[in-house]
Amino acid sequence: MGRTFLLTGPTRGLGLATARALLRREPDATLILAGRDEAALARLAQRLGKARPRARLETVALDLQSAPSIRAAAAAVRDRAPQGIDALILSAGLQFTTDGLTTADGVDLTFANNHLGHFLLANLLAGDVVADGRILFVSSGTHDPAQKTGIPAPDLRTARDAAFPPAAGRGEAPGTAARRAYSTSKLCNVLCAYELDRRIQLCGRSGPGVLAFDPGLMPGTGLARTYPPLLRALWSWVLPNIIPLLRAMMGPNIHSAAVSGDNLARLAVDPSVHGWTGVYVSGRAAIRSSDASYDRALQAELWALSAELTGLSPAEAEFAWKAVSPGPPVRPGPEPEAFTTLRLPA
């Protein structure tokens, strides 16, 4: 058998496209499909298995809004991959249009699903990733206020602002806070990737590499499934058919799910990206992320709060508790062309 991959959110959109691209690139792979809908996972595994009969398809129940579910999923993954994991592909994501949604513990629901769940899963399984493996956090260009994405800019002066957003009452239109929570969660994905990479390096052993990935705007994916019916229809049926026009109007970072899925699969398997770590990748290029994403103090603060909220213990995670001095905020690194090892400077 070939290499082993874990993919979250595989039943639709970017996750589904990534699953197909992975098996096209690695037809002998073991692909562990992790998601909340077990029936949908089983149907997907059956379809993928028919198309790629040499692959080994496994399914694992995973609710990213539930720490017990995440811990159970991590244990199940270890049982299915005793020889280790070649890539953790953390693709699942939600965007809401209703303000003020929280978990039972009062944590912002978007933050909990898009960041906290993947933070815990990555920490529980990072020690099982092979030395030259990869951990891939799916972020978004919405994390960067300098990019005009149409989504409100992140609000992350402190880590607690992400977990417990300031009370509504800013006079914003309904749904603005919910969409801002999405961009904030995507900034958290980048901050988390950089902090995990630093901790792995400080442990003094090789790899795995850690990357944050921007798939670009992808009309037709399930990201708009909570939108009103008219907007959902526009997103699902109209915009996917005019991507060339959208690119001409809005810029090149607009792709079909199939293109972005292949770009993400490339980061998991392609030898040409071996050694890339601690960087942000948009499409197929390593670029600078937002200025705020390089703030070491904010990275460390978010890490500490995330460990507290998930109950992550030293015994559970090989890299989580390596002492890290936050230091001053880090200035953005050099242009990608100047990279030698594709690591932004410490």
Image (cartoon, rainbow, N blue to C red):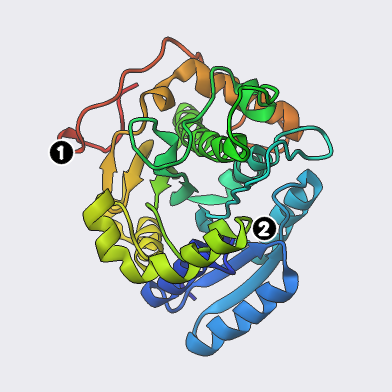
Residue 7 in view in this figure: yes
Query: x and y percent of residue 237 in the render?
Result: 46, 71
Give residue 78's mark: 2
Please name the residue shown 33% across and 31% down the image: 146
Query: x and y percent of residue 60 in the render?
Result: 70, 65
What's under tag 1, amino acid-wise?
Answer: Glu
Please name the residue shown 70% across and 26% down the image: 164
Please name the residue shown 66% across and 26% down the image: 165
Q: Is residue 75 left or right of residue 19?
A: right
Residue farthest top in this picture: 328
Of residues 153 and 266, the one drawn nearer to the viewer in this rendering:
153
Give residue 55's mark: none
Of residues 51 and 240, the one drawn nearer to the viewer in this rendering:
240
Viewer-nearest of labels 2 and 1? 1
Query: x and y percent of residue 247 in the render?
Result: 26, 57
The CA span between labels 2 and 1 is: 38 Å
Within-10-Å neighbours for mark 2: few <14, some 14–19, many 20+: some
Whether tag 2 and tag 1 are in contact, CB under 8 A, the answer is no
Q: Secondary structure at mark 1?
A: helix
What's under tag 2, amino acid-wise?
Answer: Arg
N-terminal of the pair, mark 2 or mark 1, is 2
Residue 84 in view in this figure: no
Picture mark count: 2
Please name the residue shown 73% across and 50% down the image: 70
Q: Is residue 345 left or right of residue 207?
A: left
Give residue 337's mark: 1
Rendered-image quadrant of the C terminus = top left
Query: x and y percent of residue 171 in the render?
Result: 61, 25
Residue farthest right in this picture: 104
- Residue 345 against residue 137 in the figure, above or below: above
